Image (cartoon, rainbow, N blue to C red):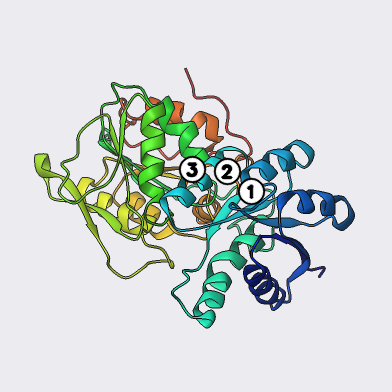
């Protein structure tokens, strides 16, 4: 197998050396060159033809955002992972980069940590992202023949209205959420809870940016907040978010329990809690993301009688999370990201047909909602 060819762009010689040695230590990866600023990187791309670029944000001559603008003009499909600091400025610049076409991001290891810890952080955080964006992640096997959609697992359907929407997403999620939440109407009749895999600071800034573009209120989740209609809460970085309580006292809880699926916040934690609190009155939405976080939570929602829809493969940056739900037969339907908001809005006010079998739709053949 030909290794993934990587161009590392960073003004720090220490970081370039650490990234080069760590990434090249994986047999599936090869660092073909490094560059100390964006202008040098742009000159090297036509000769090297890398499969992926890691791009620092703070650089002299031509910084990461300026480089990304030029990259996207010349190479619109070339995967780019931003390498940013875990700071307010770094988080804001990263969100800018994602909105400008960056594929994903990773945060730089803290200067206070040891070299061994920094290398391990790169192995855990950066290498899986590179492989996922370049198609080397091992896909889950579908439950039917290739090219066919697995049947949605049958269950007895009742007729409860949806009283909460729970969304889980990761890689590609900030842009996907920017497609969905601003299209939710201001009179949306139920609360929305969201897990986006992101560190602290990033989730707060993401909520603020989404709030500025949305008709509904969007905030970072806080312990004790009582859930209300027409309001979305995003789980804070490094905290799980759950829905607890009963009846009119349903509220948010945040905690630093053990990571699940190597994630905190984890989609499974949120989905499990809404299934327990709301029973069949849940619409779960699994969007673009690496890995399989949300799969077990989707099972909880389905077991409680709720519905689960997913983002389709074509519009996902990485189809790991929604793809795992699809492969397990837990998705009631799949939709392009630009149609998810309309589908959520369509499903929430109406009840489902009592006793009707689940509708089977594949990610490749979903048509417009019936009128």
Cβ atoms at labels 3 and 1 below 8 Å apart: no
Callout 3 crowding tier (Cα within 10 Å): few <14, some 14–19, many ≥20: many
Q: Secondary structure at mark 2?
A: helix
* Residue 337 in picture, x, y percent from top left: 53, 35
Residue for badge 3: 174
Callout 2 crowding tier (Cα within 10 Å): few <14, some 14–19, many ≥20: many
Could you tell me which residue is drawn at 48 percent across and 80 percent down? 114
Cβ atoms at labels 2 and 1 below 8 Å apart: yes
Callout 1 crowding tier (Cα within 10 Å): few <14, some 14–19, many ≥20: many
Residue 345 marker: none
Q: Is residue 318 above or below residue 179?
A: below
* Residue 229 in picture, x, y percent from top left: 23, 31
Of the numbered discs 2 and 1, the one sitting upstream in the chain is 1
Residue for badge 1: 64
Who is closer to the viewer here, 82 or 163?
82
Of the numbered discs 3 and 1, the one sitting upstream in the chain is 1
**Quadrant of the rendered structure where residue 184 is?**
top left
Count of numbered badges drawn on the protein: 3
Task: Locate residue 280 relative to residue 148 in the image: left or right.
Answer: left
Q: Secondary structure at mark 3?
A: helix
């Amino acid at each position: 197998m030909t290794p993934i060819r990587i161009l590392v762009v960073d003004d720090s010689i220490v970081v370039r050396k650490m990234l080069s040695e760590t990434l090249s230590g994986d047999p599936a990866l090869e660092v073909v060159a490094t560059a100390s600023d964006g202008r040098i990187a742009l000159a090297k791309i036509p000769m090297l033809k890398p499969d992926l670029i890691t791009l620092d944000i703070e650089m002299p001559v031509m910084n990461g955002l300026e480089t990304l603008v030029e990259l996207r003009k010349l190479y619109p499909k070339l995967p780019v992972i931003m390498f940013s600091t875990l700071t307010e400025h770094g988080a804001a610049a990263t969100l800018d980069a994602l909105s400008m076409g960056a594929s994903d991001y990773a945060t730089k290891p803290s200067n206070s940590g040891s070299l061994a810890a920094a290398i391990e952080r790169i192995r855990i955080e950066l290498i899986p992202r590179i492989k996922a964006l370049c198609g080397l992640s091992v896909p889950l096997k579908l439950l039917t023949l290739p090219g066919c959609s697995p049947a949605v697992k049958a269950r007895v359907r009742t007729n409860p209205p949806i009283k909460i929407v729970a969304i889980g997403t990761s890689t590609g999620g900030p842009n996907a959420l920017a497609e969905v939440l601003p299209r939710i109407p201001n009179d949306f009749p139920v609360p929305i809870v969201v897990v986006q895999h992101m560190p602290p600071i990033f989730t707060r800034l993401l909520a603020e940016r989404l709030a500025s573009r949305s008709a509904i209120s969007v905030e970072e989740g806080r312990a004790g907040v009582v859930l209300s209609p027409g309001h979305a809460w995003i789980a804070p970085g490094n905290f799980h978010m759950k829905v607890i309580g009963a009846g009119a006292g349903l509220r948010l809880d945040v905690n630093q329990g053990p990571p699940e699926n190597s994630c905190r916040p984890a989609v499974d934690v949120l989905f499990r809690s809404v299934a327990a609190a709301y029973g069949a009155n849940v619409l779960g939405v699994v969007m673009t993301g690496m890995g399989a976080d949300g799969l077990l939570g989707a099972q909880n929602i389905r077991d409680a009688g709720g519905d689960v829809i997913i983002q389709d493969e074509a519009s996902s940056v990485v189809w790991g999370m929604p793809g795992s739900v699809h492969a397990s037969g837990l998705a009631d339907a799949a939709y392009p990201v630009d149609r998810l908001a309309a589908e959520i809005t369509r499903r929430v006010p109406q009840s489902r047909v009592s006793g009707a079998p689940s509708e089977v739709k594949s990610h490749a053949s979903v048509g417009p909602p019936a009128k």
